[in-house]
Structures are given as C-alpha cells and as structure tokens.
C-alpha cells in the first residue's frame, strides 16, 4: 500500500468551545463528537496476505459515534502569584482527550465498544 493515502478517520473530530471572562477568572465549556470505523478482512481458506493484490474473503465494516462534554476554570487566587485551575471531561470514546491517554474504543464481541470516563 505504498503511495496510497489511508486514514482510519471517517470524519474529523468536531469540537465546540465557549470561553467567558466575566471579570474574575476564566471559564470554558466545550463539547466534542467523534466517529470511529474498523474495517476487517475475513479470509477464506487459502492464502490471504494483507496488502497483496489477491485477497479473497469478505470485509466487515463497523462504525460507531462518541461524544463528550467538559469545562475548565482558572481562578486568580493571588493575582500574578497563585492561580487555581481545574478541568473535567466526561463522555464515551474520548480517551485521547483525557490526561491518561486511554484508548477511544476497543473491539468487543464483533462490535466497537466505547471506553467510558471513570464514574
């Protein structure tokens, strides 16, 4: 597959954000939507080499949708010396946007399963 542009993204991630500076502190709210796709080749009996020009079998395409919401705050407790900041993100399929870099989806029993935020 040299020279072939391949992407696993069905569509780009969609992110919305609103920021507020009401006079004391900085506040943000945001949302995101994501699309996941997995293509699998099921080979029939015989040679089946990925990337070859002769592959026999059936393809299976799985698609799912993920979304999340979140917010953040930055408060100047002692201006120019001490700030308090915090953020939260909750949703399904948002692993790459979290601090721990968790997987977005996993393959489970013939389908794509979301990784949920910790409760």
Image (spheres, grey):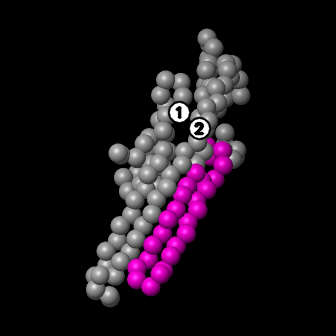
Q: Quadrant of the C terminus?
A: top left
Give the residue at x 47% y 48%. Answer: 91
Asked whether 35 or 101 is in front, the reply is: 35
Give the residue at x 48% y 44%. Answer: 92
Q: Quadrant of the N terminus?
A: top right
Residue 118 x, y percent position in the rendering? 35, 46
Residue 72 x, y percent position in the rendering? 42, 67
Numbered range of the magenta stretch: 7-33
Badge 2 density bin: few <14, some 14–19, many ≥20, Cα 10 Å: some
Indicate yes or no whether the magenta region holds residue 9: yes
**Disc 1: which residue:** 112
Residue 61 x, y percent position in the rendering? 64, 30
Asked whether 10 or 68 is in front, the reply is: 68
Give the residue at x 53% y 24%. Answer: 110
**Disc 2: which residue:** 64
Q: Is residue 109 left or right of residue 15?
A: left
């Amino acid at each position: 597959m040299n020279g072939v542009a391949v992407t696993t993204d069905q569509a780009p991630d969609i992110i919305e954000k609103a920021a507020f500076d009401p006079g004391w502190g900085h506040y943000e709210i945001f949302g995101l939507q994501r699309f996941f796709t997995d293509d699998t080749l099921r080979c029939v009996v015989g040679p089946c080499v990925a990337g070859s020009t002769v592959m026999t079998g059936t393809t299976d395409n799985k698609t799912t949708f993920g979304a999340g919401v979140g917010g953040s705050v930055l408060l100047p407790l002692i201006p120019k010396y001490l700030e308090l900041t915090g953020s939260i993100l909750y949703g399904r399929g948002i692993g790459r946007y979290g601090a721990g870099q968790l997987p977005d989806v996993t393959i489970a029993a013939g389908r794509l399963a979301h990784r949920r935020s910790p409760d």
